[in-house]
Amino acid sequence: MPRFSLKERLFSFKHAFNGYKVVFRSEHNAWIHIAMSFAAIALSFYLEVSNSEWIAVVLCIGIVISAEIFNTAIEHIANFIQPNQDIKIKHIKDLGAAGVFTTALASFIVGLIIFLPKIMLLIQNGNH
C-alpha cells in the first residue's frame, strides 16, 4: 500500500472542483438549485433560525446539489454509452431527474415547515 501523502490528498480535491465546473457549465437546473440555496441561507440568517433548523437547511442544500451532481454523472454515462436516442437511456435519465426532483420537493417542504411560521409571525406583527 502506498504511503499516505497529504499533498496528494489535497491535490485530489482538484477532481471534485472539476466536477463542480462540469455541473455548473452544463446544467441550468444546477444554477436554479444554487440560487435557491442562497435564498434559503439568506432567509435563514434574516429569520434567525435555530441551530437544528440550520442543520436541516444545510442538509437539504447538500442533498439537492449532490442529487444534481449524481444525475449529471448518470446523464454523461448514458450519453457515452448510447449517443443516439434510445428509450432505455431515456428511462434511465428520467429516473435520475425524478431523484433530483424528489430531493428538491422534499427540501421545499422542509423550507415551508421552517420558514412559513416565521414569515407569518412577521406579517402578523407588521414587520415586513
Image: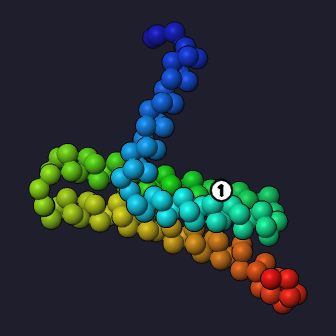
Give residue 110's quadrant in the image: bottom right
Asked if residue 128 shows in the view, the reply is yes
**In-front residue for pair 118/87:** 118
Rendering coords of residue 93 (x, y %): 28, 60
Amino acid at the residue labelled 1: Val
Asked if residue 49 shows in the view, the reply is no
Quadrant of the snapshot with the C terminus: bottom right
Query: At 77% from the left edge and 85% from the top edge, which residue is drawn?
Result: 120
* Relative to 32, residue 108 above or below: below
Give residue 106's quadrant in the image: bottom right
Tell me the SS state at disc 1: helix
Rendering coords of residue 80 (x, y %): 20, 45
> Left or right of 124: which side holds 2?
left
Query: At 17% from the left edge and 46% from the top edge, which residue is drawn?
Result: 81
Residue lying furthest right = 125
Rendering coords of residue 28 (x, y %): 40, 61
> Left or right of 65: which side holds 119?
right
Label 1: how many Cα within 10 Å (few below 14, some 14–19, many 20+): some
The residue beneath circle 1 is 58
